[in-house]
Amino acid sequence: MLTLFGYALKNLGRQKLRTFLSALGVMLGVWLVVVFSAVSGGILNTVSGMLSQFGEDFHCYKAGVADQFLSSVEESRTRKRLRALPGVRETASVLTWFTRIPPTDFVVLIGLRPGEFALESLLSGGRGGFSGPEADEAIVGEEIARRLKLDVGGKITLEGVEFRVTGTFATGSPLFDNAVVLPLERMQAVFRGGGDIANYIAVKVARGRDAREVARSVEKAMPDLSTVASLEELPKVDQGLRKMRMWSLVITVTATVIGWLFVMLAMVMSVFERTREVGILRAVGWTQRNIVLLVLLEAVFLALLGVAAGIPTGLLGVEVISRITDLSIYIAPSFGGAIYLKAFLVALLAAATGGIYPAWRAARLRPVEAIRHE
Amino acid sequence: MSDGGLSIRAEGLTKAYEDGRIRALRGLSIEIEAGEFAAIMGPSGCGKSTLLHILGGLDRPDEGRLLLGGRELADRELAAYRSGRVGFIFQLHNLIPVLNALENVQVPMLGVGGPPREERRSRAEGLLEAVGLSARLRARPPELSGGERQRVAVARALANDPDLVLADEPTGSLDQESGARILDLLGRLQRELGTTLVLVTHDERVAARAGRVLRMLDGRILPEPAAGG
Ligand SMILES: Nc1ncnc2c1ncn2[C@@H]1O[C@H](COP(=O)(O)OP(=O)(O)O)[C@@H](O)[C@H]1O
Ligand SMILES: [Mg+2]
């Protein structure tokens, strides 16, 4: 049974190596999209999870910083002023720091004060706690505990100071589950020279109050602070996130261009080789539109081959990347349906744009000249 | 089935290539009745293929008047004319190499608005049976002999039930026996279907089967010798 689809498929089978190579080009584009989207989606998930990890409504950062981890606010004075604002129910200070515990590359340290809602929220999914605000004690996330074979009663040395493990917790977030939590004041003393410093202040608003409204009033009353209630607001204190959007666009465009180039080259060659055949088709009554349709269909099939090969290898790629790097310490790659849709659309766009020129060339061939072509 | 052939009437056709340096047709006039079998003979390069392409709506003359079935066709009617009324047979490389015989015969019916799948298929089977290829439906062109390939081409030319079949040296690359078989076939189909058949050939024996022989030279049809003269 002959259909246009069947004919287009058979045409792809004519030059198997060429079809394979050009599908490989599309696959490369799909691969880029899958890998980048999975990783960036994972980063966004981690970051947005961070914004409400302790059940808070928003964070207050130092205004004007280029990266959220570089923010430092004067802890006690800022909290005093925050608490005086109407609508603020509770505040908690959070201090972050990066250090190294051999053999791992990076460990995130988080300073939380006993008695504040942040630490309580974390411990509600764990056990143990701190005996005092300045104890040399550590509570460890379940992932890092597993990796370093730590448990309650064990010891951990951080930048020359020995901490005793007095608790563990599990959140489901790779960033937190790979973190070590220390008493805030001890952490200020050991890692920040005793400064009265927090990275950000987590704020819970009073029942019935609109978090965004309260956040706005905070910024108004304290212009040295930037509030972040959601992922969309994070670029206020994080250039990296802004760049990620741009990179996402760059990757998408690059992937499309790669696919376009391969599809176009393959189809131009294929159409040229079939010049006489195009003439025959016209002679037996095919319209220019039929010819365009045939060539575009072949381009689309090429792209679908690329998608079919690109998605599984892309997933494999993400897996390999998170095994050989410490990516999985910070993020869980996200494999939402949107990724496949995006990869599919990129490939389809590559096929459409890559197929148009050869299709146009084939349709434009003058039948008599095509027939004379040997 | 078609209810008769297509009449052809052309006056003063010219066609030049390469900015006028090659004058393929030089004021050619021709008249062929509906249902007639006409052979066109002439030396290589005298414009036979050019004429056939113009009659088949593949190309346009530069000048002259061309009535096909009594009508002058507009440019936008040509594709429909080719697909609905004309069947083409070329000397060589007629077929699509990746498609088998059955599929090749269906190619003209694939266009938008063609018959539905089942009909395409049964029609193609019927045509291949008519040309004696029922046993080779699944064979692809490289597996067919030259004669078999031309028989597939004949079946394909008839796929859309044309009123005019144009054959450009259809036996030129065949041995005698296969060539004769193709001619028998064309002649029979032409008689049975009442199709107009215009056949270009170098071979006097081939021409002898035609109802009429038109001789071409330098882009013109030579006057026919008076009947009985
Ligand atoms: N598309 C074309 N471009 C240039 N020259 C052509 C083209 N088609 C035919 N010709 C020339 O026109 C003349 C007639 O060609 P053609 O009709 O193929 O002759 P025949 O079929 O009788 O051998 C030849 O000189 C041929 O080279
Ligand atoms: Mg010729």
Image (cartoon, coloured by chain):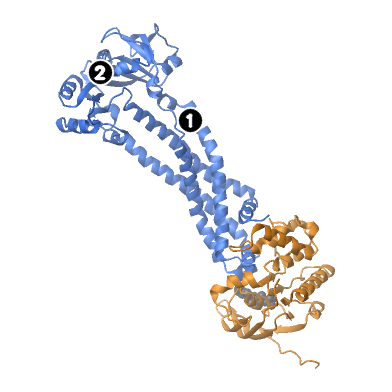
Chain colours: A blue, B orange
Q: Is residue A19 above or below residue B200?
A: above
Q: Residues within 10 Å of mark 1 (few under 14, many from 20)?
A: some
Provide the residue designation for mark 1: A321
Circle 2 SS class:
loop
Q: Which residue is mark 2?
A: A192
Please identify the quadrant where the C terminus of chain A is shown.
Answer: bottom right
Q: Check disc 1 and report its element: helix, strand or loop.
A: helix
Q: Locate residue B203, reporting x and y percent.
A: 79, 77
- Residue at image position (76%, 83%) is B212
Does residue A174 sit above or below A371 in this rendering?
Answer: above
For badge 2, the amino acid type reads Arg
Quadrant housing residue B188: bottom right
User: Could you say which is closer to the camera, residue A17 or residue A140?
Assistant: A140
Q: Left or right: A335 with respect to B215?
A: left
Question: Looking at the image, which is closer to me, A369 or B120?
Answer: B120
Q: Is residue A259 left or right of residue A241?
A: right
Chain at numbered mark 1? A
Residue occupying the point 68% across, 57% down: B118
